[in-house]
Amino acid sequence: MNLHGIDYSIIGIYFLFVLGIGFLLKKRIKTADDFLMSGRNIPLWITSLAFISANLGAQEVLGMAANGAKYGLYTAHFYWLGAVFAMVFLGLFMMPFYYGSKARSVPEYLKFRFDEKTRTFNAFTFAAMTIFSSGISLYALAMLMQVILGWDFNVSIWVAAGIVLAYTFLGGLTSAVYNEVLQFFLIVLGIAPLVYIGMQQAGGLEGILANVDNAKLHLWKGMGSAATNPMGTDAFSMIFGLGFVLAFGYWCTDFLVVQRAMISHNLNDARRTPIIAALPKIFMPLIVIVPGIILLALQKQFSGFELPLNVNGQVDYNMTLPLLLSKLYPSGILGVGITALIASFMSGMAGNVTAFNTVFTFDIYQTHIRPNAGEKHYLNVGKATTVVGILLSILTAYVARGFNSIMDLLQLVFGFVNAPLFATFLLGMFWKKSTANGAFWGLLSGTGAAALTYSLTVAEGKGGSIANLHTFYSGTSQAFNIAWIAFIVCFIVTALISFFTEKKPEKELVGLVYSLTPRQQDKNRIWYKNPLWIAVIVLVITLVLNIIFY
Amino acid sequence: MNKFFDLRFVIGAFFLIVGILLLIYSFFNETVAHAAVNRWSAIFFIVFAVVMILLSFDKKPEDKL
């Protein structure tokens, strides 16, 4: 890919703005709460866009385009079956407990609801997961810069890490959130012209319908059996594994995204944040999945659109978006497209680092290392943790260089951690008899069950380290099944142990458990201020899309 | 100085600069097709930027969607 002066200028202007936001916000940061929680003072439209932007990292932008080419429209299930319903559930039912309990983090809610050991277990697994994820974003960014721009791997890593460090260190969470919103618009406006140009080149909708395998243009057709759809998964795994466990596990319990709603002005804003965020989320497939489908149509009609092979000799679907950018964008708008890709990687990295420093400072350092220190001390710890988080991400990026399957491993780690955690939260928030010991051992058992399932099954040559009791059609199908098994095991173990262990007094659970907390009354007659009305609109649009693209 | 703290102004300023750059560059493109892509993208960016900057003059962003 050949960049010109105009393209480098756009990338340079973006870097200047990102750093400028950090410098402008620096004077606002006076306490640890300002640095790590934005003083709970961020307007609704910013928290809503930051909510989906925190997830617009490398896996979303590159990964979904790749899945679009590999699985076609079935990939939209990640949005129209998973994310949207989970975000509505979070806003309507779970946010009152997160926000109302005054918890500063998801692990801290677990302490209020259960006990310290459950919180600490979640804090450590989450901290490890965020560093891992941040390092992968950095590694993927450096690889992309090396492959498509010919930049040096080491220079790419240190420059990107240095910029993220500068703006998160200067402006804390507010800076990360503000940059996420800028990155959101950049990603949408930078990639939208690609969809338009690609559609034109492919012959419009008729060209797509004529040149793409019909099996890849549906959402539900062929879902009766794993053998009859491109994703290789059946309806049960899709609905229960992805639609319920994985999606709800990620969107409702992962502090990386939940944190964006928890920094709202008030409870109503906190509840509306994920629901309003669901509106643009519904249409994200147009930006991140459709390019993959367009590539399939272009491959049928023109030469030069073949994807390269990866180190294992397989088609490298991750190059879908970079290939389209290089083939369809002229210099100028190409600079915007490349900047959008860089923005997505940096957004993913900054989101993870800011979630990591909050959890480490409040849930590990303040709890176990030095409680009762002054505000200034925790501010300094938060800043130092930001530096450490970036350094650990760089280290992870270099480690990732030696393992070509580490992206698959990351997906599995999410399944191992988030799937059982959702069972813990479901029981914790909606069943007052669930106990601390039940939650702790349930979480351990769920994670263990996920590891065991992975060790006993194989998909695309991965897994089965103990034995091969079952072979899945695809890695995606394996991940969905691991998720629902981990969820069920955690759910059953938590419930069983809760029957025989000591329960918290009910008066300590007020505001933490559904049946013991006064109901939220959504009396506001202005529709856009009422979470319930917005949720109804979101769900109706999603259902209609599911029917149209059946 | 307060205006710079409004994120809508910052976003608007970014896309205005990028849009103007693309618009100027489109006059130097070698092919008509490339010039059109850059020009229409530039116009869209500039319109979006102006809308964001105008919105930033609203005093209560928290009351908006």
Image: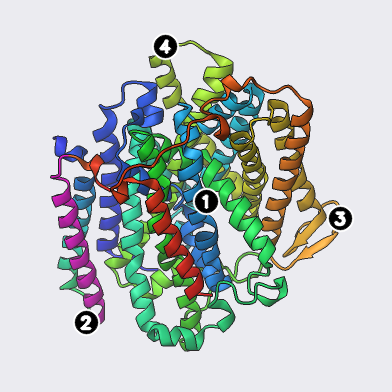
Counting from the top left corner in percent of width and height, residue A112 is at 57, 24
Task: Find disc 4 in the rendering and name its residue.
Answer: A374
Q: Chain of mark 2?
A: B
Q: CA distance from mark 3 to mark 2?
A: 61 Å
Q: CA distance from mark 3 to mark 1?
A: 34 Å
* Mark in the foreground, 4 or 1: 1
Task: Find disc 3 in the rendering and name its residue.
Answer: A467
Q: Are marks 2 and 1 on the same chain?
A: no
Q: Are marks 3 and 2 on the same chain?
A: no
How crowded pointer 2 is (Cα within 10 Å; few <14, some 14-19, many 20+) is rated as few
Task: Find disc 1 in the rendering and name its residue.
Answer: A86
Counting from the top left corner in percent of width and height, residue A269 is at 35, 39
In this rendered view, identify the residue nearer to me: A478 or A109. Answer: A109
How crowded pointer 3 is (Cα within 10 Å; few <14, some 14-19, many 20+) is rated as some
Q: Secondary structure at mark 1?
A: helix
Q: Amino acid at mark 3?
A: Ala
- Which range is magenta? B33-59
Q: Amino acid at mark 4?
A: Gly
Task: Find disc 2 in the rendering and name its residue.
Answer: B32
- Give the residue at x 28% y 29%: A26
Counting from the top left corner in percent of width and height, residue A13 is at 25, 51
Q: Are marks 2 and 4 on the same chain?
A: no
